[in-house]
Image (tube, coloured by chain):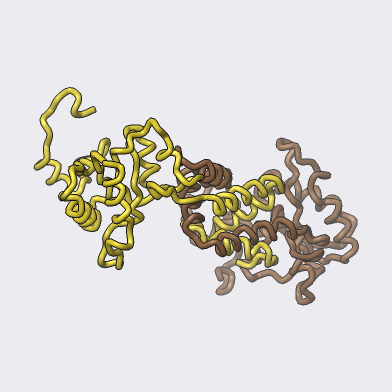
Chain colours: A brown, B yellow
Amino acid sequence: MSYSSKLIEKAVEEFSKLPSIGKKSAFRLVLHMIQKDKESVESFLHAIRNMKENLKECSTCFNLSDDVECAICSNIARDKTVLCVVESVRDVIAIEETQQYNGSYHVLGGVISPLEGIGVDDIRIAELIKRVHEANAKELIMALSPTIEGDTTVFYISKKLADTEVKISTLSRGVAFGSELEYTDEFTLGRSILSRVPYTQSSLK
Amino acid sequence: MSYSSKLIEKAVEEFSKLPSIGKKSAFRLVLHMIQKDKESVESFLHAIRNMKENLKECSTCFNLSDDVECAICSNIARDKTVLCVVESVRDVIAIEETQQYNGSYHVLGGVISPLEGIGVDDIRIAELIKRVHEANAKELIMALSPTIEGDTTVFYISKKLADTEVKISTLSRGVAFGSELEYTDEFTLGRSILSRVPYTQSSLK
């Protein structure tokens, strides 16, 4: 597109570098910026710069954090002996959204994947092992992707912790709430038949 | 959503103020910003600030411009006696994209709309009248929305210029190229039958 303005052209180019934003959407966003008052635009720019300059990684769990220790690790109401092991910060937010979990987290930063060249030293496994010992952790909840890579990572970590008392659990797998059996993949469906649970009034809640 | 970081929360809030960006997309964009290197983010912020600070309105046609006069008005190859009257800057870009037009523009900034409280003095009609006289314009192409408000605006401007020699034309209306007759609204279809054109080899090009 030709915008008859280099300034607009450059701004559109920058916006269209963002994920899932094409040239047309980028131009719509730029026009929005042009129409907004100066204070609103400044507030937008400031929020991004401020975040970029001040956001840290929590020194304990590697979650994104405003301080040296994140809001979850520094919350005394949360159980520090139960660690939920996740791949990324997105997963922390997804689990926090459920409001069903009151322990702590450990953000691995990925899963072991020989195909993508991610080995055991590229993700925070050593930090996890050290933390399990230091915090005297009772339980590790492995909330990793239900893939071969995720399963490999769980296996590796469980082997590394074989000499400890820590209990290792994984998320339950099966058919998702609200999904249609017809469209559930055969692997999941087969597995959920094999790992069927006795019916009680509360088991389907 | 809870992000365990005020910095992220604020950035997500700012991104979700943009048109057609919800909280989830905003968070995806924020994560993208977090992962990008500092220079890329700075370049993004700079492009927006630079545009916001330096973008002007062309003093002649009111198109957005880097200088006092826009790239179209200052282009000596463009016909200054043919003015295409449009509602907004978006329309200028849409028409420029067609590469079918070599005249100049006049951005009205809206159309007369009593319902929305937009009167003749709220859009740049006086500037247009003055310009027609000063530039000795030969033709005005009224490229306004095909709505009652657009038609009213065309009517008002044509009355105001009744004492001049300027030729006033509107965009042709009819069925769009590539559209299906079945789904064309009856008003457009009826009108395009009444204003049918004699067939020649070139008329369908």
Residue A58 at x, y percent in the picture? 79, 61
The answer to whether residue B202 is seen in the rendering is yes
Is B189 positioned to the left or the right of B10 in the image? left
Report which quarter residue B155 is drawn in.
bottom left
Name of the residue lying farthest toward the front: B134
Where's the N terminus of chain A, which quadrant?
top left
Would residue A189 be seen by someone viewing this image from the given angle? no
Taking the image as shown, residue A193 lies to the left or right of residue B84, namely: right
Asked if B153 appears above or below A7 in the picture, the reply is below
Q: Pick whichever, B153 or A185, lies toward us.
A: B153
- In the displayed image of the protein, which residue is found farthest to the top? B201
Which image quarter holds the C terminus of chain A?
bottom right
Looking at the rendering, which quadrant does residue B181 occupy?
top left
Is B159 in front, or is A64? B159
Residue A15 horizontal/vertical position (percent): 55, 47
- Residue at x 49% of width, y 51% of height: B56
Where is residue B144? Give x, y as percent. 27, 49
- Find residue A113 and report its image quarter: top right
Q: Residue at x 50, y 43 (%)?
A: A22
Tell me residue B79's x, y (percent). Answer: 33, 34
Q: Which residue sits at x=42%, y=35%?
A: B75
**In front here: B47 or B61?**
B61
Nearest the camera: A12 or A63? A12
